[in-house]
Amino acid sequence: MQPVFRTSLPLPGRREGKVRDVYRTSADPASPLLIVATDRLSAFDVVMPTPIAGKGRILTSMSLGWFGFLRSRAIVGDHVLGTDLSGVAGLTAADRATLAGRSMLCRAAKVVPIECVARGYLAGSGWNEYRANGTVCGIPLPSGLQQCSRLPRPIFTPATKAEEGHDENISFERACELVGVGLMTRLRDLTIAIYTAAADYALERGVILADTKFEFGFALGADGQPTDELILVDEVLTPDSSRYWPADDYQPGRDQQSYDKQFVRNYLLELVAAHKWNKEAPGPQLPAQVVDATLQRYEEAVVKLGLTPFGASR
Ligand SMILES: Nc1ncnc2c1ncn2[C@@H]1O[C@H](COP(=O)(O)OP(=O)(O)OP(=O)(O)O)[C@@H](O)[C@H]1O
Ligand SMILES: [Mg+2]
């Protein structure tokens, strides 16, 4: 399979994220978005020069599977319109072949500039902060927790959506100052509800959802202005936005073998330790075995979670 590193489609409004290329499907500012998951991989917020061929397809199917799951639970509305691109004008047959399986049509939204993170376990930046202060994003936690310990209950730890560079963890109070207490209260409750439903489902299938990040937005109306309809946007519950661990190998007190970019991160940390990379762009080329192992882990997670593709009858 040919990897898709970057797309340049004959559509307006092109924006490029670290992993996704986003377009509008017509000149109308309220027209549906075409969100394309490329095979780019970012680690430490740097896009690697080596694509992971097929990753965009895996992530799209996983995200759509979870959107379908969340619809069945009726927790929150979302931005997905579908995957049938036959109504999108201007694409060549080659464009359509490139996009198949890695793109979704979505309602355009004004994205709330807060990353909504739910954590059920103590990992990553949460563990680092807990070790230093006994808190995570300012939330005090019981003493005696270990690395990757399960928390007494899931917590909401918002972060700013940085335009450039790294997102920054902030307190709930700070998030309220930025976008309002009413909105943040809704986002917190939705984030915990979605996390809890997804984590329960995953655990029944032998997968721990340690933490995850959601983005929400206000759907645009016909005039292109945001309405007051709050919807879940972006990707959901993929290994790019979440930490997944195999439950049968789980043991607090150490790092876990996660279903995500762990192989890449470990490889990169070796380079950093050897002073061969400084965590700044450009990233280094990734060796084939790291690429293959990463893809394999993503595939394993999809199989284990066994989600029904979006739109299929259940
Ligand atoms: N329905 C939507 N309406 C508008 N923007 C959206 C919608 N869904 C997702 N997005 C935006 O599309 C982009 C997806 O690209 P990607 O995830 O690769 O970006 P990123 O590098 O994570 O950048 P960012 O920091 O902006 O999230 C994100 O900026 C996300 O906020
Ligand atoms: Mg993103």
Image (cartoon, grey):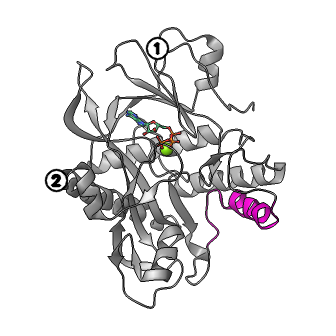
Location of residue 116 with respect to 156 vertically, above or below: above
* Residue 122 seen in render: no
Residue type highlighted by circle 2: Gly
Q: Secondary structure at mark 1?
A: loop
The residue at the point 41 percent across, 70 percent down is 120
Verify whether residue 269 appears in magenta.
yes
Give the quarter of the image for residue 55. top right
Residue closer to the observer: 151 or 75: 151
Q: Which residue is mark 1?
A: 88
- Identify the amino acid type marked 1: Val
Badge 1 crowding class, 10 Å Cα cut-off, few under 14, some 14 to 19, many 20 or more, is some
**Left or right: 82, with 98 as reference point:** left
Q: Residue at x 61, y 60 (%)?
A: 259
The tag earlier along the polypeptide, 1 or 2, is 1
Please tell me the numbered disc located at residue 182: 2
Q: Name the residue rendered at 48%, 64% in the picture.
A: 209
Q: Is residue 11 left or right of residue 270?
A: left
Please tell me how crowded label 2 is: few (under 14), some (14-19), or many (20+) other residues with Cα within 10 Å.
few
Considering only vertical position in the picture, is 129 above or below 181? below
Image location (x, y in percent) of residue 281? 68, 46
